[in-house]
Image: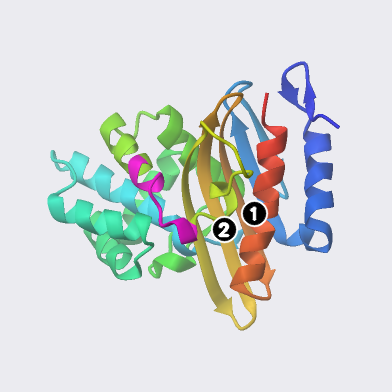
């Protein structure tokens, strides 16, 4: 069944498709997507708040870039070296250093506030920052389609890195159907066993190609293993890819 009606996504059909794909795990997943062609945002379990894990690294880099701009400069060569490690390889030490350089939790909170991310709370331990899928879509939208708070050159740089993540870290939104060509993806994923046996696996990104252009976020919790969490959010990403095509 198509989720399109008059060019717009039928949210109820898309939600039912998510329920069917996720089965008994549906309550552990939240998702959101902004479809640029219609200007509509779809949300699935939007009130579910989750720990960011490494998806917060995108916000960290945005806060460093903003801090540098406020000071009258731009990202330094060392910033860029750290940023490449942090985004493409998900290096935690690089993230910790950039978080310090960008002003830590207060600076990240300023960026989140400016982008309208009302339910995002940066933590001094950056991986424990809490957020919602709808908030993360606001961040990806700002990067993909522009926002007065972020300069175009910084947005392009962040997306360039998100387009070059290690292949082993491109699950979730970064996984495209086999054989698909001409579709570009910028993605950042996160995974964290914060409680024993309870993995948090998350994915944020932008998908653009023939017939589709959307920003999306998928968050999951209570995964028995990292592999289980990655598989779960990849199922959710496949639903979005199918239903947000034109």
Q: Which residue is mark 1?
A: 234
Categorize mark 2 by other alpha carbons within 10 Å: few (<14), some (14-19), many (20+).
Answer: many
Magenta residues: mostly which secondary structure? helix
Horizontal and vertical percent position of residue 126:
40, 65
Q: Which mark is residue 202?
A: 2
Identify the magenta region. Answer: 160-169
Q: Which residue is depicted at the point 55% across and 76% down? A: 194
Q: Viewer-nearest of labels 2 and 1?
A: 1
Q: Is residue 160 above or below residue 48?
A: above
Relative side of 60 to 225, left or right: left
- Residue projecting furthest to the front: 179
* Residue drawn 28% across the image and 54% down it: 84
Q: Is residue 130 above or below residue 215?
A: below
Report the disc number at residue 42.
none
Residue 137 in the image: x percent, y percent? 54, 41
| Viewport quadrant of the N terminus | top right
Distance between the Cα atoms at labels 2 and 1? 10 Å
| Residues at discs 2 and 1 in contact (Cβ within 8 Å) | no
Among the two numbered marks 2 and 1 on one chain, the one whose residue lies closer to the N terminus? 2
Q: Is residue 48 visible?
A: no
Seen in the picture, residue 89 relative to 141 is either above or below; the reply is: below
Mark 1 lies on a secondary structure that is helix
């Amino acid at each position: 069944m198509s989720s399109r009606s008059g060019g717009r996504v039928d949210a109820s059909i898309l939600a039912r498709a998510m329920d069917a794909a996720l089965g008994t795990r549906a309550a552990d997943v939240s998702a959101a997507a902004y479809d640029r062609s219609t200007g509509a945002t779809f949300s699935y379990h939007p009130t579910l708040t989750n720990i960011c894990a490494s998806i917060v690294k995108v916000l960290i880099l945005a806060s460093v870039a903003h801090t540098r701009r406020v000071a009258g400069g731009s990202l330094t060569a060392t910033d860029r070296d750290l940023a490449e490690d942090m985004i493409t390889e998900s290096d935690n030490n690089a993230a910790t250093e950039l978080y310090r350089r960008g002003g830590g939790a207060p600076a990240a909170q300023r960026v989140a506030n400016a982008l309208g991310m009302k339910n995002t709370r940066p933590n001094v331990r950056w991986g424990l920052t809490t957020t919602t899928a709808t908030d993360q879509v606001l961040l990806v939208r700002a990067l993909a389609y522009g926002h007065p708070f972020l300069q175009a050159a910084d947005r392009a740089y962040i997306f360039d890195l998100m387009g070059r993540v290690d292949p082993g870290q491109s699950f979730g939104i970064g996984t495209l159907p086999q054989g698909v060509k001409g579709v570009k993806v910028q993605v950042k994923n996160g995974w964290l066993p914060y409680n024993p046996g309870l993995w948090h696996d998350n994915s944020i990104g932008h998908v653009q190609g023939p017939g589709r252009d959307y920003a999306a976020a998928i968050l999951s919790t209570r995964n028995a293993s990292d592999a289980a969490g990655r598989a779960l959010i990849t199922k959710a990403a496949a639903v979005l890819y199918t239903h947000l095509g034109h």
